[in-house]
Image: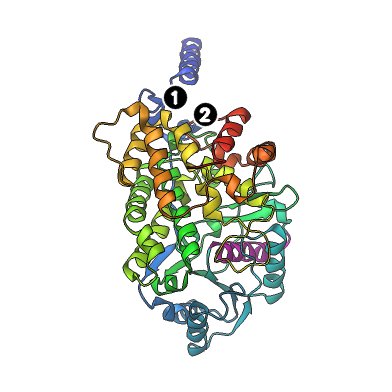
Amino acid sequence: MAGGRERVAHLLRQLQRAACQCPAHSHTYSQAPEHAALRRTDYAFEMAVSNIRYGEGVTKEVGMDLQNLGARKVCVMTDKNLCQLPPVKAVLNSLTKNGITFQMYDDVRVEPTDQSFIDAITFAKKGEFDAYVAVGGGSVIDTCKAANLYSSSPESDFLDYVNAPIGKGKSVTVPLKPFIAVPTTAGTGSETTGIAIFDYKELKVKTGIASRAIKPTLGMIDPLHTIHMPERVVANSGFDVLCHALEAYTALPYKMRSPCPSNPINRPAYQGSNPISDVWAVHALRLVAKYLKRAVRMPDDHEARANMHLASAFAGIGFGNAGVHLCHGMSYPISGLVKSYKAKDYNVDHPLVPHGLSVVLTSPAVFTFTAEMCPERHLEAAEILGADIRTAKIKDAGLILADTLRKFLFDLNVDDGLAAIGYSKADIPALVKGTLPQERVTKLSPRPQTEEELSALFEASMKLY
């Protein structure tokens, strides 16, 4: 009898491994957690997000928050451009008014590198701070995440927490200090996420650190701060929101992502599309469709800029848990291999392809490529962005979304593809090589890709119009 039960159990395990893995047909997706060891793909997703506070002028509360936390010595991080502008002054006034002792670090690099992260980490370790405040865009907030992490884990090597395969990708188990993020751009959503991105100079690619543990304690979203953003900064930040929403909504479903973690601490921050992230991603996309062009074209349109600030946070909640895929994976070498391009409205002393621009330039090619895996979602996204889909055929979803994106980008005066920012076909092998290590995101593409297909996507992105 016992032998018969063992044979039946063995047969069931074989059937399970051979089962269709698509969400529509597989019964394995309803398995209870105790059967996780038998699974190749995950069965659960987890939502993690910073506390969010929103409102005009809310920055004045930051000093009270730190007082409530019992903070005695605070590190304030920002960059050279922002340190004389109203957002930083509002934070410092609040700290002073509430008797908070602080030190300022204003050497954050726009588009951080491993070295600029290390410089900030060194400052944080020496300061022995018990709380952190970041005032700025994604570069500042991400740098502060790294400073908080490594100062809280002073014996760790820099690559210990960096995403594999570039780093070791270790789980974060040390307690971090309280951290308040005050975003001044409407783009990265970094105030909501456990992601910190930087250029790894040795390989000339972007990579990062991904862990729920490093997300800010509080994201303080004050729409007054977006008034100071120049036109191109508004546009490029908005393109990041656009792609966060599109990629999160079209990412591989969480039940199809592998491997299934043996312990929940190993479940990645980027888990695949899921019912909760879908809600945030779609709503963010609707706000982008309604407000981004207004926010770019009319600096005094406070309604548009305030709503883009919210859209950034909404998309952050979506992609911070679902993840992004090919647009972001391909963007990292586009930024990392920049030659001489310097974006308008960015006051920097080094060549720079802004993150949002590097992401959006491949979007028409990417969504043409991925659409066959979830065409309904691609078609829905095209409709939200303004396409008339009443007579559309489902097989044309990718082409329709690509054409809709091209029109959207053309209306906002976006550079005509990778060629316009200094790349040629001769650069494609290096761009592909820089994309290959980005498995953390590229494996979330709903459609797997070969090196040849990546080459074709870069080639198709050389010109947009």
Q: Which residue is mark 1?
A: 21
Q: Position of residue 255 (x, y in %)?
A: 43, 34
Q: CA distance from mark 1 to mark 2?
A: 9 Å
Span shown in magenta: 138-155
Residue contact at pointers 1 and 2, CB within 8 angstroms: yes
User: Is residue 176 visible in this depiction of the protein?
Assistant: no
| Residue 321, numbered label | none
Callout 2 amino acid = Arg
Q: Residue at x 43, y 36 (%)?
A: 253
Give 465 or 369, whichever is nearer the viewer.
465
Q: Which residue is mark 2?
A: 40
User: Is residue 334 visible in this depiction of the protein?
Assistant: yes
Q: Position of residue 138 (x, y in %)?
A: 54, 62
Closer to viewer: mark 1 or mark 2? 1
Q: Residue at x 68, y 36 (%)?
A: 429
* Helix, strand or loop at mark 2: loop
Give 11 or 382, whichever is nearer the viewer.
382
Binning the other alpha carbons within 10 Å of mark 2 as few (below 14), some (14 to 19) or many (20 upward) gives some
Provide the major secondary structure of the magenta segment: helix
Give 75 or 293, whichever is nearer the viewer.
293
Q: Is residue 49 above or below residue 345?
A: above
Residue 425 found in image quarter: top right
In the image, 268: left or right of 273?
right
The question of residue 286 being in magenta is answered with no
